[in-house]
Image (cartoon, grey):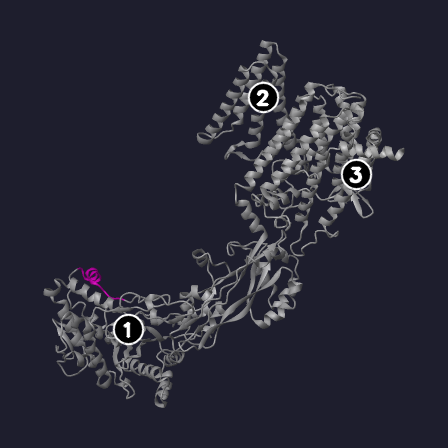
Amino acid sequence: MLAERNYELGKRRYVLGAIAFAVVFIYVLRLFSLQLLSDDFKRNADSNAFLRRIQYPARGGITDRNGKLMVYNQPAYDIMVVMKEQEGVDTAGLCNALGITVEWYEKRMQEIKDRSRNPGYSSYTEQLFMSQLNTEEFSAFQEKLFRFPGFSIQKRSIRQYTMSHAAHILGDVGEVSPSDIEADDYYRSGDYIGKLGVERFYEKQLRGEKGVEILLRDARGRIKGKYQNGKMDRAPEPGRNLTLSLDLDLQALGERLMTGKKGAIVAIEPSTGEVLCMVSSPTYDPRKMVGRQRGVNSANLNRDPARPLLNRAIMGQYPPGSTFKTSQGLTFLQEGIISPATAYPCSHGFRCAGMKVGCHSHPAPLPLIPSIATSCNGYFCWGLYHMFGNRKKYGSIQEAMTTWKDFMVSMGFGYPLGIDLPGEKRGMIPNADYYDKAYGKDWTSLSVISIAIGQGEVLLTPLQIANLGATIANRGWFITPHVVKHIQDEPLDTLYTHKRYTKVKPQYYQYIVEGMRKAVTGGTCRGANTTMYEVCGKTGTAQNPHGRDHSAFMGFAPMDNPRIAVCVYVENGGFGAHFGVPIGALIMEQYINGKLSEGSEARAKSFENMHTISIQDGTE
Amino acid sequence: MALNNSNRKDEGILRSLDWFTLFLFVALLAMGWMSVCGASYDFEEGTQLLDFGSRSGMQIIWILTSLLLGTVILCIDDRIVESFSYIIYIGFVILLFATPFLAHDIKGSLSWIKIGSFSIQPAEFAKFGTALCVAKAISSFNLRLDKWRDLIICGIIVLVPMLLIVLQKETGSALVYLAFFFMFYREGMAGSILFSGAAAVLYFVVGIRYADEPLWGIVQISMGEFLVLAAIHLFSSIMMWVYTPLRGPFMRVLLIGSLTYIFAVLFCKYMLPFNACWVQWVVLAVMTIYLFYLALRDRLLSYALIGIFAMGSTGFFYSVDYVLNEVMQKHQQTRVRVLLGLEDDPRGAGYNVIQAKIAIGSGGLYGKGFLNGTQTKLKYVPEQDTDFIFCTVGEEEGFVGCTLVLVLFLILTLRLIHLAERQPLRFGRVYGYCVLSIFMFHVFINVGMVLGLTPVIGIPLPFFSYGGSSLWGFTILLFIFLRIDAARNRLLH
């Protein structure tokens, strides 16, 4: 049958051709919108196919100023689980291999699946099942690992300590909290972060940079090799090593001497601001804060009424007592209230308008230098009385107070000094507003007279007192105290290399230095005198309304070219000469000579056994 | 001189063969093989592409045997094929009937027969048998498809294998037989039948697929219902333009209708949300009454027929909705939804289509390059080297590669239309239209499914999808037509 030529029907070929053309056109438009207009699909594809496995860098090590290793890393092994793959695993066998109970296993599995506790949960990705197995546990488990599909081992490193000292300075590392993750998207759930001390302050330097290995993952979550044979991977960048300014031997001695006492020792190298030792007592063994026992130990330390976790050297705020008189003498000299020759009367204290501040018996009247040496209360009360009463110079007592406050602030009081440790307290230097509020403008120098002798409202941290010692040793300047001397491949913050000058001219410091020298040779600090080098010192006995007085000492040595400035503060230690002076002397001897003489060693032993508190070691 | 004769005959075929189509065929095969390589490549083991143990290696065997098969077909006299048409058809009907009893259950499908170590799917081959049969019937009896009787005869020839394939639980392959309606249309079936059929499918798919989605964020309006009612309005207007002489009523219906809809939706969005479909009912009712009024006024039946079309369409849509939601059992509803690609997998509705879109979308302009695609190889895309093979093209060759493939298929379709139209015999033309209709249907449904535009119906993409049965089926289909075409000049000698 020949095909008929029906032209009406023949035209229908164009309809069919047009349909084909239209459909292809629509599909090309659709392809255009899918492939060229949106990046979402590309991102989705990447998150489908690429498993970014994080490579953890080694955390930086920490040594003391002489290169003695203090903190290093030890491998530990986390057990990870992928929920989707572990279904049907031999639970009893697993618990047996890991030495855990079935109840613990089930509880842990519930915790992992609980999105309120584990926000990033996905049944297709690795979740932390059990952390920090040691090498023996790891090798025992690894042999059996093949029996437990879905479980894998992730190598991590945990902190390890060569010694038991300097817990407060070193701080510790622990798992990141949800707020850490929120604050810095570097962290993922289960990562470690410095919690206290330099571990926290230098977290960025110590942690290094995580690397990443890009693996290909199929739709069932199985790993199918490396993406582009690892070309896109990034190796982890190890953390930087820190050299602390601490002298480990000095730190150890300080901790020994403070055994059984509450308080702090801070020693600073005046020329650099480097902290040579920082003891806060009671202390704890940093080794307790690692491993799986961390949680229990940390809770115990937190509950201890002696508060061993508190770093009293920077967080304890104490009345500085007589150590503060040095700053007053300097202020009065600079302001022209007194001259070195000015003498004030003292008859067992400062008496004025019915007001009395007691003093011990000593010859009177005395000029500045012997007043420092004998720690005369009357002298400095009169000085403050005359300064605050000088309407001609200041106009009002408020103005005088403001001037005084500015002097104190320039010496590093009233605000955190800026040490490279978290949690530093500012202490307390009252200003005119403070008293206006307290007394309603109606106050005189007599109302506030006790601040002249480091009592009343004035509070300093032991660090600020030690820094005052360093400032006097330097005759008028200090470098912000810091505990890290050197960071690997990175300069220190300029804050820790620049001199800060006080408002007092260097020439006035000479008189205070002389007074402090006299205190050692023939005054309140005779216990610190030695023939080996010239020690300067100042005791402090701070009245404590809650109990026995606090015993304080501030000093430095040698007098010229000083190498160490120290503050000892023993809570409820009684007279400054009782605990403060001898402990300070031992610290200076240890640092300057590198060791203690036999006699000193014997004295150190006796101090070690002299307790002011009954130690309640909550961690035992 | 027998030898001499056969020599001359061969020269005749080589000269009259349509080399352009052959070139398109080879180009598509080559691109198809690359896609199978991409889809079956294993990153971990770095599959040897030519290793016969791998899918890509096996596909080479299928391609080579297809070429051999094509050559053999070109050597057979087309008149023999034509004269065997009925026998081939009846043979396939018997085979299709027997298949479920012989078949191994593969994923619930009873369409595969195992012969030795190979499995073949008779449904893929039955297409050319059906095409030959319907072409032979039309040409022998000079059937006129604008007549109901003749159309029904042809319909029965097509429906028998279709129903037998449905019994094999291969609904997708069965639906391919709807492609024959394109050929029926060319051979004289009323255009309104094709149009009504297309409209019915559109109402059904759009209405159910988008039934539960809000329109433009307005929860009171079901997107499916709104779109279907708007489509009924639009189609009625188009029919007025095509079938009636006056332009005024057409403009009135189109403009008033669309403005009312736009106003109603804006009112819903910004003033008071309500179900704007009520407005559509009113408008459609007014339009129908207007059409009947025009029919009476102008004494023109077309207006009344269009009115009936609008009423019928609305009735069809709501009865489908009613049957699906009220009459059908839960599991039957599920099957319909599965057919529409709404519930197609265990991981939640639309997983397959979403992964397919991700794979294609991630390809960008030039794609990730040969064997560099991740989504298909890592098995995020299901059926990645068979039904969803186009994902590999999208991911590895990008927009450029996809467009090239679609354009090649378009050229192939247009070329086959050209070849069919130049046939001196009706047999050749009908068969040619059958071939191009089947190709069109496969390409449009397969690619549309991967792009998320058509329901998920599991049918292969010609020359691309992995597998011997479908490739052989398409090759036989195409080469029989090329053989018929090569003999087109015989009558002129």
Please give the chain letter of the residue carrying mark 2: B
How far apart are labels 2 and 3 at the CA level? Answer: 47 Å
Earlier in the chain: of badge 2 and badge 3, it is 3
Judge whether residue A120 is colored magenta: no
Q: Are marks 2 and 3 in contact (CB under 8 Å)?
A: no
- Residue B443's tag is none
Task: Report x, y in % for residue B409.
Answer: 66, 35
Q: Is residue A36 above or below residue B198?
A: below
Residue visible at 23% across and 86% down in the picture: A521
* Mark 2 burial class by Cα count in 10 Å: few <14, some 14-19, many 20+: some
Where disc 1 sits, the SS reads helix
Q: Is residue B393 above or below residue A530?
A: above
Q: Position of residue A238 (x, y in %)?
A: 49, 66
Disc 3: which residue: B71
Amino acid carrying mark 2 in the image: Ile
Query: Could you tell me which quadrant the N terminus of chain A lies in?
Result: top right
Start and end of the magenta stretch?
A: A428-440
